[in-house]
């Protein structure tokens, strides 16, 4: 926990940007009946019945100090999917950065070993050497600012029925563009000092 908090305390450095990564999923649901249009004093009404139409995975990268985020929609969330996302992040978004300080949870695919499943050893090693990984602790995913950004996405964009993956891609792209245009940042105020006081019960007790 303190490792992640120390990373968040650092000043902005374009050569070593702090980027948070998280994943989520969205079930696609189609309407089986036409919604009733709104009337004076009444909102549009939807039938409680719906048809399931698959699930999509979402990768979200968020650089809090720059107010930048990127959302990708994929069919699966395998180690290869993760590796391809990392390659794009390093080579396309941050080609001039020395290293990316990557904050994420310790999902079994979130490891440099996944790079070797997607690329030849030389390429995998090249990518891995540009990563400085900081894992959030178990049951501490709330420390990941990308998870908080997903919460905004859920409330502002995904809190309704989305019938298919193409519609999902269009919706999250519009949401992302607007957030990036506004350079929506995150003010993180929880510090190591706060943790040592408010979460004192999580620290081991030293007997004198």
Image (cartoon, grey):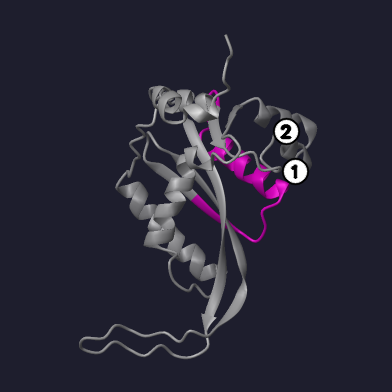
Q: Residue at x 66, y 31 (%)?
A: 127
Asked if residue 22 lies left or right of residue 83, the reply is left
Q: Quadrant of residue 204?
A: top right
- Judging from the image, what secondary structure is the residue with disc 2 in? helix
Residue at numbered disc 1? 118
Q: Residue at x 49, y 35 (%)?
A: 19
Find the residue positioned furthest to the left: 40
Disc 2 + disc 1, Cβ < 8 Å: yes
Give the mark nearer the N terminus: 2 vs 1: 1
- Judging from the image, what secondary structure is the residue with disc 1 in? helix
Q: Where does the image place residue 125, in percent across and percent down from the top left? A: 72, 28
Q: Examine the structure image and report whether residue 98 is included in the region drawn in magenta.
A: yes
Q: Examine the structure image and report whether residue 121 is included in the region drawn in magenta.
A: no
Residue at numbered disc 2? 124
Quadrant location of the C terminus in the rendered image: top right
Q: Where does the image place residue 189, in percent across and percent down from the top left? A: 34, 32
Q: What is the spatial separation of the Cα atoms under label 2 and label 1, in whole angstroms?
A: 8 Å
Around disc 1, counting alpha carbons within 10 Å, would you say few (fewer than 14), some (14 to 19), or many (20 or more)?
Answer: some
Q: Where does the image place residue 131, in percent across and percent down from the top left? A: 60, 28
Q: Which residues are magenta?
A: 71-99
Is 180 located above or below residue 47 in the figure? Answer: above
């Amino acid at each position: 926990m303190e490792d992640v908090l120390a990373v968040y305390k650092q000043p902005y450095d374009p050569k070593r940007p702090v980027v948070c990564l998280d994943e989520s999923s969205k079930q696609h649901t189609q309407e089986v009946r036409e919604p009733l249009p709104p009337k004076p004093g009444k909102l549009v009404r939807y039938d409680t019945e719906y048809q399931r139409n698959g699930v999509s995975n979402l990768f979200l990268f968020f650089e809090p100090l720059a107010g930048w985020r990127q959302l990708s929609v994929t069919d699966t969330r395998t180690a290869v999917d993760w590796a391809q996302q990392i390659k794009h992040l390093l080579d396309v978004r941050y080609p001039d950065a020395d290293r990316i300080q990557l904050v994420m949870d310790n999902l079994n695919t979130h490891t440099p070993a996944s790079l070797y499943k997607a690329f030849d050893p030389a390429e995998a090693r090249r990518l891995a050497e540009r990563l400085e990984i900081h894992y959030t602790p178990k049951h501490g995913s709330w420390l990941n600012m990308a998870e908080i950004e997903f919460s905004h996405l859920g409330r502002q964009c995904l809190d309704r029925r989305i019938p298919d993956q193409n519609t999902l891609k269009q919706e999250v792209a519009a949401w992302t563009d607007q957030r990036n245009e506004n350079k929506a940042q995150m003010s993180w105020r929880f510090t190591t000092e706060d943790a040592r006081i408010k979460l004192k019960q999580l620290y081991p007790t030293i007997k004198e």
